Image (cartoon, grey):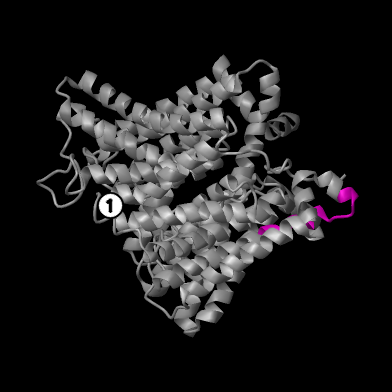
Amino acid sequence: MDIFTVALLLSTLRLATPVALIALGETFSERAGIINVGVEGTATLGALVVALISFYTRSPWLALFAALVAGGLAGALHALWCIRWRANHVVSGIGINILVGGLAMFITGAVWGWRGTSPSAPTLNPWIIVIAGFVIICVAQVYLFRTRWGLRLRVVGEKPEAADTAGVNVHLTQYFYTILNGVLCGLAGAFFFNNLGRFTFGMVGGRGFIGIAAMVIGNYSPLGGLGAALLFGFVDALQMRLQAHIPNQFSIMLPYLLTVVVLAAFIRRANVPAALGRHYVKQ
Amino acid sequence: MRQRLRGWLGTALVRETGLTLLAVALAFAVGTLIIWAAGFSISAVFTNLWRGAFGNRISLGQTLTQATPIIFTSLSFLIAFRCGLFNIGAEGQLYVGAMAAAVVGTVLRVPAWLGVPLCLAAGGLAGAFWGWIPGLLKARRGVNEFVTTMMLSYVAIELTNFLVAPRGPLHDRTAWSNQTVRIATTAMLPRIMRPTQVSMALVIAGIAAIVVWYFLFRTPSGYELRSVGQSPAAAEYGGIRTPRKIVLALTLAGFLAGLGGAGEVLGTHYRFIAGFSPGYGWDGIAGGLIARAHPVAAVFAGLLMGALRAGGMQVQRARAAPGDIATVLQGLVIFFIIAPMLIRRLLIWKRRRN
């Protein structure tokens, strides 16, 4: 078949990047014990903010920075709700998804008069984000398993009482990594914008949830998440080339169906942080 | 008298309702700030929001029409939530339910007393099947149900899209839009508030709420389901087979959402139309949470969500602001609802100041 080409390989790398970044972000926050299913909405927010700032300032670099800040703020909101107000983690994440969904439609409607889309705006070469993403993931792998800060992070998610006794500030750690998760999702969102050249509602299209799935399949390690993301990137790239051959609804369906199948087939629960989703109350 | 009043005020029902209303009020306050910051007229937005939801008979009909599927999806969300699970795929379950009802509704040639229940059953069962898969995966393999329900929701939407697309097998060749042919008259649910689209589906939604309440709070199986939600370990220790309850909860959640989809086809559109739901599945999450997972309260939460949708349409029509302000308000309500500690803190702060 002529569809297996270098171009397919390159688009695999491209399409895997946002999923891998979200998987990495989720790895950080879940290792600290905070589940965040709001990654989908956080990435959407990143894509929206990058479009807004790039449109008005014509500076894609400034826009990228703004997307990271916006993602971090969404992470901070989630952290505040989960840690300070002891909200259920999953529900707070769903709240972010719904709120951002509404805001994205509201803001595009208010600013450009088109509900759910932005006009095109200056972009960066998406390969910058792809390469940066791969570097970040490799550094994160070393950081998580070979440094003392990585160890502290893992202990917070595993046994917060022990971390506390050892002098680690549990809540501060959780805030930090949940915000970091938001920043990484913002970067993923910036990728979506720079890849397409404008914002459209639904451009993230479940890639946030697929990122969570990639983290689970990758067994809570940055490189593992990258491996799973590459698989999804490949299917995504393949799916786009299949559209000429099968009804496009089936090709669109493929990554989602694959996620369910792969999750069911390869799920390992060895590394699930023991204190995941718990509210740690200092004695 | 005062004692009695104080006792009444202290009841869980009043306290919960009070906290909920306060959360809704706070959400509207923040929403007002957003409207103001975006440069729209606050009074124009809220006048139109109210007018669109309750202004006259037509608007009220629109509110009730929008509320009907949302009550179903709210029940769908909360029944899984009571078992400690997150069904965020009600949207997809709604679509497969609607499709099944439309198919049965077009091919069956039986009297209405039989046709309508058969179509409803078909819709419910299709949705139940869509909920059963994630349930089984959760119970057997421990797969996160919020990822699988969401993924299967996308699959359901694309699958039904395919069936009614121009090259699909169920496409109505006489129509420009992607839809099935009209269902048989005998499969239609009667309209109960002409000239609006409010149908018997609303009544069925109310009955479903009562049945779900009875199931959850008055049957052993419902008690066990809630026990699993409260503490899976304790439930297991008490002899409850947790995996079975997980499958049951998600299957029932799918059934309820599927029933909602069937109601849309049999009562509102009389056919399956691609993309007919503007996000009723998501509204159900907000509805279930606002109802604090109580089935009877879900009826009121569904009405609130329906009113927001109907109001949002009017806001859009009157060009007061983008109608999506309704979704923004919905998201804000969720944040204030799930943080009772925040509300309590605000109350204490107020009391201290007094």
Q: Position of residue B27 (x, y in %)?
A: 57, 55
For this orientation, the residue located farthest to the bottom is: A58
- Residue extending farthest to the left is B174
The chain containing the residue under callout 1 comes to A
Residue B28 seen in render: no
Q: Is residue B31 magenta?
A: no
In the image, what residue occupies the spot 32% across and 24% down? B121
Q: Quadrant of residue A137?
A: bottom right
Q: Which residue is mark 1?
A: A248
A17 over B341 or under it: above or below: below
Q: Is residue A266 left or right of residue A206?
A: right
Compared across the picture, whether B291 is left or right of B71 comes to right
Residue B87's spot in the image, x, y percent? Answer: 50, 38
Disc 1 marks a residue whose amino acid type is Asn
Looking at the image, which is closer to me, B301 or B105?
B105
Judge left or right: residue A193 versus residue A75: left
Q: Which residues are magenta?
A: A164-178
Residue at 75% over, 51% down: A154
